[in-house]
């Protein structure tokens, strides 16, 4: 089974210079490693990651906050291009965020605003692997400090400023977590 990796990031350009290019490369690396890209079916960072995945023939799934394609396009003003499948959740942004993080094996955080922070904290609480692409701006710059203040550790979190290295670290951490879960299950049986 292919790993499902979500890219979470700002729909608006509050990012550092080069963040979109890095997001494109993250999407590309996800696809090149045989993983499936999941996004919030929006513009900005997620759309650039989707474009990157599609540039190498990857699979891209978008989870929309809208109830239908019509609402996705006309009410939310979101794109349909570059995605192989869009799931119309009808749960607005906060509900979509939770579904998105729970339907993947890992979340990669790039730049971002409050929605990205919501996706990060949901992934953290659900014990998902989280990769943080540093140097991209937005809430990404505050995550290290938030983790320090929260005093909850960073067991499943990796940081890197290079898209290729970050995706490799994320995949490696997914594998480690799978082995640990399997060993625990075997131990209890």
Image (cartoon, rainbow, N blue to C red):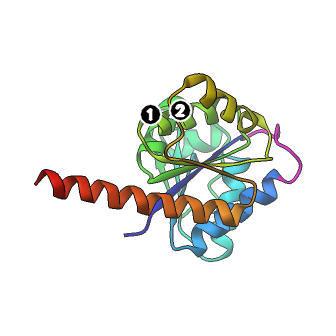
Q: Nearer the viewer, residue 152 or 96?
A: 152
Q: Would residue 140 appear left or right of 122 to someone viewing this image?
A: right
Q: Nearer the viewer, residue 72 or 171?
A: 171
| Picture coordinates of residue 18, whole percent (x, y) | 86, 54
Are dots 2 and 1 in contact, CB under 8 Å?
yes
User: Can residue 43 be seen?
Assistant: yes
Q: Which residue is found at the position 69% from the left and 29% from the top?
A: 145
16 within the magenta span: yes
| Picture coordinates of residue 76, whole percent (x, y) | 63, 36
| Residue found at the very far top of the displayed protein | 149
Q: Nearer the viewer, residue 152 or 129?
A: 152
User: Can residue 90 be seen?
Assistant: no
Q: Which residue is found at the position 79% from the left and 46% from the top?
A: 136
The residues colored magenta run 11-18
Q: Which quadrant: the C terminus?
A: bottom left
Disc sitting over residue 125 in the figure: 1
Mark 2 and mark 1: span between their CA atoms?
A: 6 Å
- The crowd level at tag 2 (other Cα within 10 Å; few <14, some 14-19, many 20+) is some
| Picture coordinates of residue 22, whole percent (x, y) | 77, 58
Residue denoted by label 2: 121
Q: Would residue 40 appear left or right of 145 to someone viewing this image?
A: left
| Res. 186 image quadrant | bottom left
- The crowd level at tag 1 (other Cα within 10 Å; few <14, some 14-19, many 20+) is few
The answer to whether residue 25 is above or below residue 132 is below
| Res. 117 image quadrant | top right
| Residue found at the very far right of the displayed protein | 17
| Picture coordinates of residue 7, whole percent (x, y) | 60, 51
Mark 1 lies on a secondary structure that is: helix
Q: Would residue 176 appear left or right of 139 to someone viewing this image?
A: left
73 within the magenta span: no
Disc sitting over residue 48 in the figure: none
Q: Which residue is found at the position 48% from the left and 34% from the top?
A: 122
């Amino acid at each position: 089974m292919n790993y499902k990796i979500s890219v979470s990031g700002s729909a608006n350009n509050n990012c550092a210079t080069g963040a979109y290019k890095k997001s494109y490369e993250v999407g590309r690396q996800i696809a090149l490693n045989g993983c499936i890209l999941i996004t919030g079916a929006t513009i900005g960072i997620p759309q650039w990651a989707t474009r990157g995945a599609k540039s190498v023939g990857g699979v891209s799934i978008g989870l929309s906050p809208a109830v239908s394609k019509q609402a996705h396009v006309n009410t939310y003003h979101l794109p349909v291009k570059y995605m192989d499948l869009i799931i119309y959740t009808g749960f607005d942004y906060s509900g979509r965020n939770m579904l998105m993080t729970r339907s993947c094996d890992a979340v990669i955080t790039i730049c971002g605003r409050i929605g990205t922070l919501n996706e990060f904290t949901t992934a953290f609480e659900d014990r998902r692997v989280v990769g943080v692409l540093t140097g991209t701006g937005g809430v990404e710059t505050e995550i290290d400090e938030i983790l320090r203040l929260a005093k909850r550790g960073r067991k499943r979190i990796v940081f890197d400023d290079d898209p290729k290295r970050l995706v490799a670290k994320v995949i490696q951490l997914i594998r480690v977590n799978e082995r640990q879960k399997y060993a625990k299950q075997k131990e209890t049986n």
